[in-house]
Amino acid sequence: ETGVTQTPRHLVMGMTNKKSLKCEQHLGHNAMYWYKQSAKKPLELMFVYNFKEQTENNSVPSRFSPECPNSSHLFLHLHTLQPEDSALYLCASRKAGQGRDEQFFGPGTRLTVL
Amino acid sequence: GQQVMQIPQYQHVQEGEDFTTYCNSSTTLSNIQWYKQRPGGHPVFLIQLVKSGEVKKQKRLTFQFGEAKKNSSLHITATQTTDVGTYFCAGQSGTASKLTFGTGTRLQVTL
């Protein structure tokens, strides 16, 4: 366990559904990330939050909507997704400003869009 | 934008053989990190290299950062089945909070 939890672990949804992914970190970190990992592709950074403020949006389609209510929680709201959005969605967190920049990843949510 | 490539994409070795993966960035990096992802798992941090020409060792793993800070390598001596997984390098430049992950090298080890 890395101290980063994600729910649900698996999600199947239709293209017209609305769902949310949740990430929680228990490490006292101040930066949180959403990544997308597709088969045979590198990890794609989606969003970065520092101290609850979004500092990076990597040209992500608006059907993905992040929310960071506090430094410990991160959500990814999903609506009208496409089948090509099926992937593993990974959340990560980091403690900025301590000389080590390692990111701690959660177990991921395996998303299938039908 | 910044790109980080790794070679090879895949390598299959017999237990006891050595393994090396190479990482190349299109831009100069402030530091580079390495992660390992086991099959069905999530990336786990291995190490961070910061200085030009830096070499670090973790048991059978040797990590190197190039002099120009644009390339890196991970060498595993005498592989074991527990080394199976995908190894990613991740480069940091500019914005400290953003990492660009490499394409990954999947290692398979058989007895």
Image: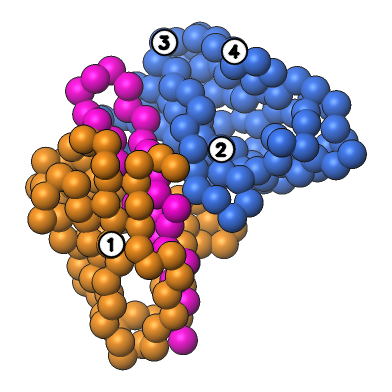
Chain colours: A orange, B blue
Rendered image: mark on residue B57:
4
Q: Is residue A95 left or right of residue B108?
A: left
Along the viewing direction, whichever of B31 and B87 lies nearer the viewer: B87
Along the viewing direction, whichever of A88 and A6 lies nearer the viewer: A6
Amino acid type shown at disc 3: Lys
Q: CA distance from mark 4 to mark 3?
A: 14 Å
Rendered image: mark on residue A22:
1
Q: Earlier in the sequence, mark 4 or mark 2?
A: 2
Rendered image: mark on residue B71:
none
Element marked by disc 3: loop
Q: Which residue is mark 3?
A: B51
Q: Residues within 10 Å of mark 3 (few under 14, many from 20)?
A: some
Amino acid type shown at disc 2: Lys
Q: Residues within 10 Å of mark 1 (few under 14, many from 20)?
A: some
Amino acid type shown at disc 1: Lys
Q: Is residue B22 left or right of residue B51?
A: right
Amino acid type shown at disc 4: Lys
